[in-house]
Amino acid sequence: MCSFLEWKELKIVYKRYASLYFCCAIEQQDNELLCLEVIHRYVELLDKYFGSVCELDIIFNFEKAYFMLDEFILGGEVQETSKKNVLKAIAAQDLLQEDSNEPKSVLEDLGLANIASALSS
Amino acid sequence: VKDSMRGLAVFISDIRNCKSKEAEEKRINKELANIRSKFKGDKALDGYQKKKYVCKLLFIFLLGNDIDFGHMEAVNLLNSNKYTEKQIGYLFISVLISENNELMRLVQQNLKNDLASRNPVHVNLALECIANIGSKEMAEMFAPEIPKLLVMGDAGDTVKQSAALCLLKLFRTAPEMVPLGDWTSRVIHLLNDQHMGVVTAAVSLIEALVKRNPDDFKGCVSLSISRLARIVTSSYTDLQDYTYYFVPAPWLSVKLLRLLQNYPPPEDTTVRNRLAECLETILNKAVEPPKSKKVQHSNAKNAVLFEAISLIIHMDSDPSLLVRACSQLGQFLSNRETNLRYLALESMCLLATSEFSHDAVKRHQETVVTALKSERDVSVRQRAVDLLYAMCDRSNAEEIVGEMLTYLETADYSIRGELVLKIAILAEKYASDYTWYVDTILNLIRLAGDFVSEEVWYRVIQIVINREDVQAYAAKTVFEALEAPACHENMVKVGGYILGEFGNLIAGDARSSPSTQFQLLHGKFHLCSPPTRALLLSAYIKLVNLFPEIREDIIAVLESDANLRNSNVEIQQRASEYLSLARNSTQDVLATVLEEMPPFPERESSILAQLRKKKPAVEDAIRVRGEKQQQRPASGAADGAAASAAPIAATPASGGGGGVKLQGDIAGAESNTDSDLLGLDFGGSAPAAAAGGGGAGGGSVDLLSSILDVGVSSSSSSSAAPSAASGASAQRKTVVVGAGASGSIVGEENWHKFVCKNSGVLYENDILQVGVKCDYQQSSGRIVVYYGNKTPAPLAQFASVINLPDSSLTNQLGIQVKPVGDRVGASEQVNEVITVDCMAEFFACPLLNIRFVYSGVAQSITLKLPLTINKFMQSSEMDSATFFQHWKQLSQPEQECQKIFQAKFPMDAETTKTKILGFGFSLLSNIDSNPANFVGAGIVQTKSGNIGSLFRLEPNQQAQMYRLTVHSIKPGVSKRLCELLETQI
């Protein structure tokens, strides 16, 4: 199957990871293949940050997913492609957090920690 | 992961555990009530709690619910000195607060503070928020500040990156708000920045700036090429983390290649060679064995390759690179990756438009045809159709059109409409034998009749009418097509029209005798919709003229109650008029009224325009190629059919004015709603409408005489009757008297242009284009206002109202509006017909107020209607004695007006003459002793009498001034004419 669809004036580029579909709407002259890799790099970033990311990580930490996206893409353009630099920026944000008194991750708290990674590639 | 809001996690978990939609709604409502009470409660919330509740609201919003509170609390979070609280505040605002929210002021104040912060993470938060919202107000407020962050020496790299993209967003929103200055020359040097991330962000900004002012940023060409050269020649270890699956900096490479597509090939040989080397290196890498089997590696590598090929096609100057690109794409055509096949077809489509590679592309025809037949993915098949269309030329047209027709039978419904247009265009463009063209179009109707739009079948009729050599063949072919037991209604329309015109050419054959033709057509009559029946009635009356021997049969049909008393007014009126015509007219009158259609003026096919609307980019590229080819002297010159193809590639001079007379007759009647589909002018409908208003039953003799006198089709006169009726009932709503103009008047500048002309664009913004076309006859006028929606979204609740700012206008003008529907679809154009009667002289200007809702925001635009008193003026010729006699008679103080003023345009006599004639005055020579002066006369025609007016215009070249004197019989008119003419010269 082709990963590109025409939709109105735009093109939809999509890729599936396990049960999740990631979609981007891009303009006619944008590079479709590289857009697929934008998706992949974002998934890699999530994976690295959460450690074997799964759907639940994104749901329970949706704000983090937003913050990571802002570091990677801004105003619709790729801002920083280096995985190290993006993660460094997110780590710096985490350091600024004040309530560091909670020792365990939320997922562990809820007994959801051992969910297999959905990242397939 | 470590930070957590436990309450939020529990809430999300609850939601996920809900077994039904109702349970989820219940849980959400409970939470909303809880948050509301917390926000309203007496107990002050601390930052953490606010953050948690705001986050919950955000989550509820993301589940698809409306959030109508909590905005203030989110804005409060921005004041927090805790980073995460601020961050959540900004996130909520970016995702959820609309740019018109009144809280935006507060937000902007916070943004301002954070931008000025010494802490770069706060600056970044602000920049990200601005980039995510990017409203016009933000552009106004921050666009002047952000460039400093971008080029300031000590700003950190991450701030620079965010600043570049933030500025880009604001530039896209409101380019006029971004001041170009010192920083613009420094910004291109960011291409040399050590930090690859900074370069990656900056290139996007530079590309946007370049699109605006390519000349100011020329320096970026050589800088980009150097940067690109360093990347493509580096080994994958050099760039460390900017290497992606063994491909060095693919994102930056693609952006640089994209940037270069804004310029022609570099003039400097060294730079040009350097770029050619880069491109060759990229092409070479494509054939090297892959460094990794991962799809990420091949995608990134090919992304760069496709972008390089785009640049090669854009430069269109290096034949060897073009041919290499083509052969590379040819290999991709049979790659097992569907994505690559798709992209190869797409790129080849562009390559086919280059004269250097057009032939190389044609070599892949067979592969592309196979793709069309065997690809399983509809996106890919669509690309194959596009490519076949692009590679089509005279040498392969019959084959390609044949393949497309075959494909049409099985094609997906979603693309049939477009496919039909493409086939129709290719068949017309490359027809050397018009019998082939006729066969192709009739095949189209047979195979996909539902998808054959009016443009397509109108066009085949235009061509048959214009080409004598194909008329007999067309008549024979449609006759045979109609013999099929079931045939599409569009076939009946074409058949009716063509037999009505040219049935006599095949009447000699006993198999298609006059009465057989008539019986064949009439056999379909009862299965057809009213518009088609109306067309058939016109065809029948044409047959009466061609074959007097079947006159009685046709009269029997016309006078049957089913037609003469049909509930459809159009059918009823046609039956009635044609019946009188058939019964009462002599053969001479018949022959005159029902004369064969004159040729249509040659003009660009409206089908092509329709396709261009669907596929702007490809169509334009192909058109450019068409023009390029025409420039090459050898191409097509010796080709017999080249001349007939020309009207499509470019619009030639019109084939003469004779065509208008009866052209409305059959084709025009099909569609009262959109009379301009054929691109024809239905001249002089106003007087005919007046004559035709008498009703459908009785005065057919009067009608006839009006037809003969004015030379207007009966159909246009009859169609005016219902519209007048509906206009009257709609009048109350569409014309408002004396109401204060809502909003200020815009587009004043364009309005002035209409004083001396009658069509053009009255107003235009990003959403709407308002065009106007008017014609005036004596004291009546017809103004057609075209509303064009320029956006991909519909305009809802669309309404227009004519506002009469001065209540005396109600007695001076009779205005009727045929209103438009309440919705203008995406990229759609609708028109509104305003008819005006000038009852007496008038001086104020009616206003047109347009209201609609675009993406949820109500808009109101008030324009001045280009309706001025001179529109009703007819030029008048007289000799010198009469002129001076009138001049003297009309010299009461209130009858005379004189103005001395500075010329507003270059004082060119010819231009001035054109304007005066356009204004409505005549130009009389040999009256003024000074030949440089202009004198003339005109009569303003109103229902309450004629107003004679005379003028004299004396230019003073040295002072660049004019003296204008107008004499007019009615007080005030001379002053008004003076004012109006003054603005024009």
Image (tube, grey):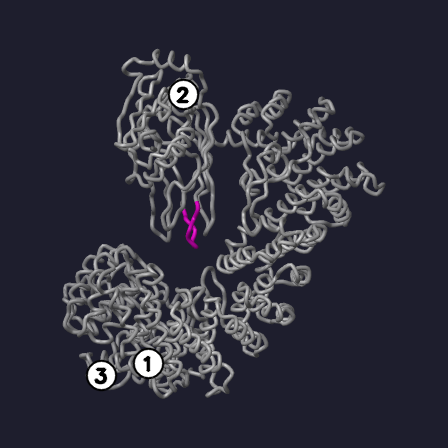
Q: Report whether B191 appears left or right of B688.
A: left
**Which label number is shown at residue B937?**
2
* Residue B188, position as x, y percentages in the image: 28, 69
Quadrant of the rendered image containing residue A106: bottom left
Figure quadrant of the C terminus of chain B: top left
- Mark nearest the camera among 1 and 2 is 2
Chain designation of label 2: B
Same subunit: marks 1 and 3: yes
Amino acid residing under circle 3: Glu
Chain designation of label 3: A
Chain designation of label 1: A
- Which range is magenta? B788-796
Q: CA distance from mark 1 to mark 2?
A: 77 Å
Amino acid residing under circle 2: Ala
Residue B319 shows up from this direction: yes
* Residue B946, position as x, y percentages in the image: 42, 17
Disc 1 designates what residue? A82
**Are there few (<14), some (14-19), or many (20+) residues within 10 Å of tag 1?**
many
Identify the residue at image location x=19%, y=64%: B111
* Residue B142, position as x, y percentages in the image: 21, 61
**Is B799 placed above or below B24 here?**
above
Q: Secondary structure at mark 2?
A: strand
**Which label number is shown at residue A102?**
3
